[in-house]
Image: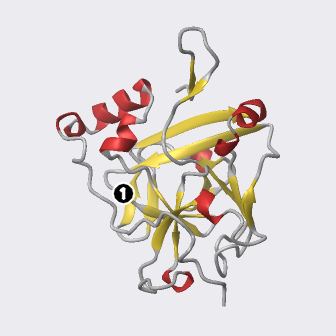
Amino acid sequence: MSYLKKIKGDADVIVGFAGGIVEGANVRTPCGPRRVELVRPGDLIVTRDTGLQPVRMVWKRELSATQIAVHPDLAPIRLKPRALGPMMPQRDLCLAPDHRVLVPGYRLAGVDQKRGCLIEARELAGSSDGAYVDRSAEMVRCFTLVFDSHQIFCVNGLPVESFLPTASSVAGLSEEFRDALVQRFPQLRREPNAYPPAEYTALNGIEYLTAQA
């Protein structure tokens, strides 16, 4: 599936989907870690709240260094080991800037320590020396997993989210991705908000982020 399209012969316009895990990251499965680029529909993934869940769709997009230079806000965010806490992540992890991470409650002021909240990776960049925008790659390949409901799962030891279809996120998809999603979840054609909502609160900034203990 393409992540770029031409409009009336003009320059490439970025389209695609929210989030993305950069290739090379390990997803937790019942058979051990598996690189995200090797995950296929039907594979079981260990989720935070609902045990083993089958992947329904895997989406891929690619961005070159040239494209990122034109659209710098799309550069991935690199999180070094312990950027958010002990073993979080366990090793370097790159995420699309709009991919949301479940930040533990003990790192967030005024939040239930047992729950945590979802924050976009871009919001974490600059919060420490271990979280920053990374424009070093010649090619960035991102993968997003879609389940029957919104899931939190571990990638390199860090809890991140799966794709969450909402009226706004579906509207932002390319026609190809949107058609594939509606074919898989036909209820979205009748009711754009029919997909189960997220169980975790999303925060729109890092003003709640506290220093590591």
From the top left corner, tell me how far across and down residue 30 is, in percent. Answer: 49, 64
Q: Disc 1 marks which residue?
A: 150
User: Looking at the image, can residue 30 be seen?
Assistant: no
Please state the horizontal and vertical placement of residue 6, each as a whole percent of the image: 57, 16
Going by the picture, which residue comes out furthest to the left? 190
| Residue drawn at point x = 78 percent, y = 46 percent | 135
Q: Can residue 90 be seen in the rendering of this structure?
A: yes
The relative height of residue 113 versus residue 56 in the rendered view (above or below) is: below
79 above or below 181? below
Q: Is residue 118 left or right of residue 35?
A: left
How many C-alpha atoms fall within 10 Å of the one at disc 1: few (<14), some, or many (≥20)? some
Q: Quadrant of residue 131?
A: bottom right
Residue 185 x, y percent position in the rendering: 27, 39
Q: Quadrant of the C terminus?
A: bottom right
The residue sitting at 52% across, 81% down in the picture is 108
The residue lying furthest to the top in this view is 9
| Residue farthest toward the bottom in the current orientation of the protein | 213
Above or below, comparing residue 212 to residue 88 in the picture: below
